[in-house]
């Protein structure tokens, strides 16, 4: 049996992109086993969290050396220098792809069949088009092994699915190690909720943030929704589990909230608003993150469009 080795990197959102890309590869290479290589998390500011999900048939490797380690390090250095000189991300070469070395930046090499070659996955692989055909399947696959009683209570207190709106607020302090551009204030989130309320009638905001106390004390959403739920003292994986119970979604410019909507809206008639600016000042429409039902706030006189 051959293997798909995935060098896992980044926070939970990026970890899910990498794992899901490996699942897409495995679909056309069914005799391959997925091995999640978690060695970067020995000294990293984000925790490794994929092991909290039910990943039947997937192995997790901690600290084991891979024969492609040197080429991964070289690629990382080359990509860093290229992006600084050319001002955009290096696109993986066809020569590397044919050898099963799927080294990339944000986007993903197209899925293909490999015969008799181990595959090495290294990058972020943020490409909705590749994952869209697997969307409902991924919503079933990406499930927690265990979660606290508190999560069960939150899920129970979320009202009828048609009114619950997930609102993910990301603050500057929270993204200090990631994105530089942050919607640090109530306006964007309140405007999106107002648009959803126009279409739905009554709504119940379900608020996710590392600064919930500020949002509550400043009453950001008190005049918009009723029975507001503030999610507190839950891990990122638990928060994602709760997000999936909502019907509509207001995203921050983070892959974490992106996954909440991508999984939570699967098979639903959801309203999903994303901010116009993503990454470090890049327009979200220039990324490969757009998927069915996702609208950009402000792209059409505040109403959003696909």
Image (cartoon, rainbow, N blue to C red):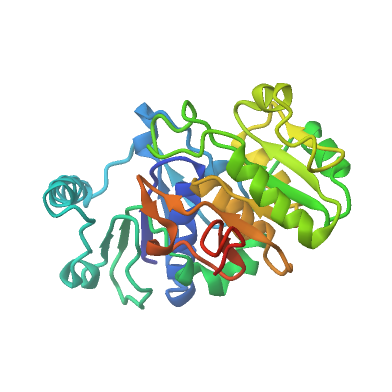
| Position above or below: 19 against 177 | below
Badge count: 0
Residue ID at (62%, 62%): 303
Residue 163 % position (x, y): 83, 54
Left or right relative to 189: residue 217: right
Judged left or right of residue 68, residue 9 is right
Name the quarter where the N terminus is drawn. Answer: bottom left
Q: Which quadrant of the view contains residue 137?
A: bottom right
Report if residue 55 is visible in the image: no
Residue 300 in picture, x, y percent from top left? 55, 65
Residue 38 visible to an observer of this rendering: yes
Above or below for 51 versus 216: below
Q: Is residue 144 left or right of residue 153?
A: left
Name the residue located 50 percent from the left edge and 65 percent from the top edge.
290
Task: Say which quadrant the C terminus sits in.
Answer: bottom right
The residue positioned farthest toward the front in the image shown: 301
The image quarter containing residue 101 is bottom left
Which residue is nearer to you in this view: 149 or 172? 172
Residue 97 vs 79, above or below: the answer is: below
**How far across and down, in percent of the image, does residue 96 sit?**
19, 66
Q: Residue at x 69, y 62 (%)?
A: 271
Q: Could you say which is closer to the camera, residue 24 or residue 212?
A: 212
Q: Nearer the viewer, residue 235 or 228?
A: 228
Q: Residue at x 78, y 62 (%)?
A: 199
The image quadrant that residue 197 belongs to is: bottom right
Residue 44 location (% of width, % of height): 38, 30
């Amino acid at each position: 049996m051959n293997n798909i080795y995935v060098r896992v990197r980044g926070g939970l959102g990026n970890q899910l992109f990498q794992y899901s890309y490996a699942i897409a590869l495995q679909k056309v290479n069914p005799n391959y086993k997925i091995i999640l290589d978690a060695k970067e998390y020995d000294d990293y500011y984000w925790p490794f969290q994929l092991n909290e999900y039910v990943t039947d048939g997937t192995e997790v490797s901690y600290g084991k050396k891979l024969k492609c380690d040197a080429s991964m390090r070289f690629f990382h250095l080359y990509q860093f220098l290229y992006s600084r000189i050319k001002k955009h991300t290096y696109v993986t070469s066809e020569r590397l792809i044919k050898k099963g070395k799927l080294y990339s930046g944000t986007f993903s090499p197209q899925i293909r069949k490999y015969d008799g070659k181990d595959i090495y996955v290294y990058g972020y692989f943020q490409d909705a088009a590749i994952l869209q055909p697997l969307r409902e399947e991924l919503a079933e696959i990406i499930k927690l092994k265990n979660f606290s009683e508190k999560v069960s209570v939150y899920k129970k207190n979320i009202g009828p699915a048609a009114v619950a709106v997930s609102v993910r607020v990301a603050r500057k302090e929270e993204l200090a190690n990631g994105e530089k551009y942050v919607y640090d204030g109530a306006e964007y989130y309140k405007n999106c909720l107002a648009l959803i309320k126009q279409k739905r009638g009554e709504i119940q905001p379900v608020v996710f943030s590392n600064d919930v106390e500020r949002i509550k004390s400043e009453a950001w959403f008190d005049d918009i929704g009723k029975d507001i739920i503030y999610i507190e003292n839950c891990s990122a994986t638990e928060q994602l589990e709760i997000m999936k119970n909502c019907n509509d979604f207001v995203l921050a410019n983070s892959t974490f909230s992106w996954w909440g909507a991508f999984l939570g809206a699967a098979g639903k008639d959801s309203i999903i608003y994303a901010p116009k600016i993503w990454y470090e000042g890049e327009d979200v429409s220039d990324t490969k993150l757009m998927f069915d039902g996702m609208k950009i706030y402000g792209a059409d006189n505040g109403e959003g469009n696909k």
